[in-house]
Image (cartoon, helix red, strand yellow):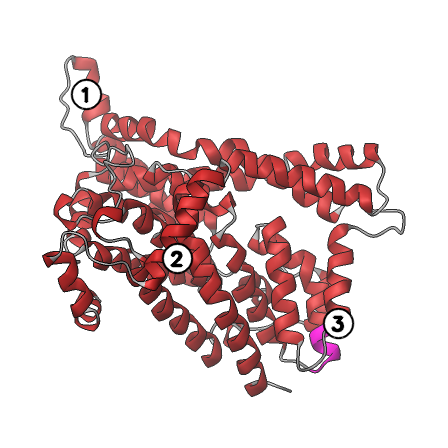
Amino acid sequence: MSKHVAAATAGTASLDADDETPSQGGLARLAYAFTQWAEKWFPDAFIFVILTTLVVTVADLAIGAGPLEIAEGFGSGFWSLIPFTMQMAMVAITGYVVASSPPCTRLIAKLASVPGTGPQAVAWVAFVSMASSYLNWALSLVLGGLLVRALARRGELHMDYRAASAAAYLGLGSTWALGLSSSSAMLQANALSLPKSISEISGVIPLSETIFLWQSVVLYFVLMIMSILVFYFASPRGHHVKTAEDMGVDVRSEMATEQAPSRPGDWFEFTPVLPILIVLLAVGYFWGQFSEKGLLATVSSLNNYNFFFLMLGLLLHRNIRSFLVAVTKAVPTAAGVIIQFPFYGAIAAMLTHVVGSDGASISHHLSHLFVSIANGDTFPVIIGIYSSVLGFLVPSGGGKWIIEAPYVLQAAKDMHAHMGWAVQIYNAAEALPNLINPFWMLPLLGIVKLQARDIVGFTFTQLLISAPVVMFLLWLFAETLAT
């Protein structure tokens, strides 16, 4: 990958090496302008969720909902995402624990040795993030964030730390929902988990009709190639670059340090025997899961993902003491997730469960508005826009599909559209608002030690370019799948 990027951009790369202050291209100037604005005006992620809560409150009042009903929706929904909150916190913690182990430190260092210049490093992070997101979105966050830190330790790259951190987020902002961890595609393919309200409309839709459609695969690669190029050319150069040191980030804090027992009782903390015994139990569990459910179903479970990484971290650290030291360092990376996700649970409840004077919720009004103006020709674009709008307010892939599916699939059925492609319209479009919504950024921000305002200028640049391309391709490929 690095060789291809270097060959395709040799002229620009030479500027990085030979010119102290190379000129900024159009994309770099655009991203720089957005970043300057975001650093000055974009609020902290917690302020963002508070303001969103108040906006939804006003919207509920506007449709005629009573103040007490809105308050009830806020309170009842506040803890609805607690299992997911714990899962997301563990994504950040276990990823950090694994990466701080000596073997992974060496592996990530090898990945970090590939690019030769700062812009190439940013493009390399984008590639790694999006490629890994096809397997698992959580993996892309953790691997991308830790790769950024490893690259930042190579001071000679003069890599913009903000742009690289934003590139690590592209798996969530561009491609994850087109891959194997797509919540909606997995839900539609599993008859046992499919709600009756959805199964009565579409029935089971196999993966061959969703993420494995050739149109979906082409869309994935178009987004990947386009995003890599955007971030390469949008990456700051010369004196515009802000390194990790400039951002006040210590990128050496996860480096493993050797410890030794100081008393006889420390044997239990330093022996590798206890971690191995526990990991053997985990191996037995995963063997049973593979045998019963198959590889795809096993790895697509977020609980299994976190369990695997926790056990892997325990094994790679080789002893309990090193493992616990890593956990202690990792816990602060999850602080934003723990305090903010409950508010998103409240927002989701206020959007879907609080009803106005006509007995309908905000999400019901939105779905009917968009579906009513769609026809056979405009269905992909209209539903894509609708999915993006609701995705900004309810940033939860699987949960949001359960809300949207009855409307989207019924409209697809009435218009004789391809049911599987309707799922992919949802998948591709709902990832777009992730580029500016801090919800999914939080685990990554915890790893790279930045604020949302530091990276959102670059991700907004990506949104401006990718949104029209995604909508056009959704429409174009729908024409090849018309039933």
Query: Residue 267 bears which disc, if any?
Result: 1
Q: Amino acid at mark 3?
A: Ile
Query: Residue 30 bears which disc, if any?
Result: 2
For the residues labelled 1 and 2, the Cα–Cα distance comes to: 57 Å
Determine whether, in the image, residue 112 is placed left or right of residue 165.
left
Bounds of the magenta span?
411-416
Residue 210 visible (yes or no): yes
Tell which circle, 3 or 1, labels the residue nearer the N-terminal end: 1
User: Along the line of sight, which residue is nearer the eye, 361 or 200?
Assistant: 361
Mark 1 Cα within 10 Å, few/some/many (few <14, many 20+)?
A: some
Q: How many marks?
A: 3
Residue 191 visible (yes or no): no
Residue at figure coordinates x 60%, y 66% from the top left: 188
> Residue 427, relative to residue 78: is it above or below?
below
Task: Tell me the quarter of the picture where residue 134 sits.
Answer: bottom left
Residue furthest to the top: 263
* Residue matched to label 3: 373
From the viewer's perspective, is the residue at label 3 or at label 1 nearer? Answer: 3
Residue at figure coordinates x 85%, y 37% from the top left: 66
User: Along the line of sight, which residue is nearer the eye, 139 or 270?
Assistant: 139
Give the image location of residue 88, x and y in percent.
47, 41
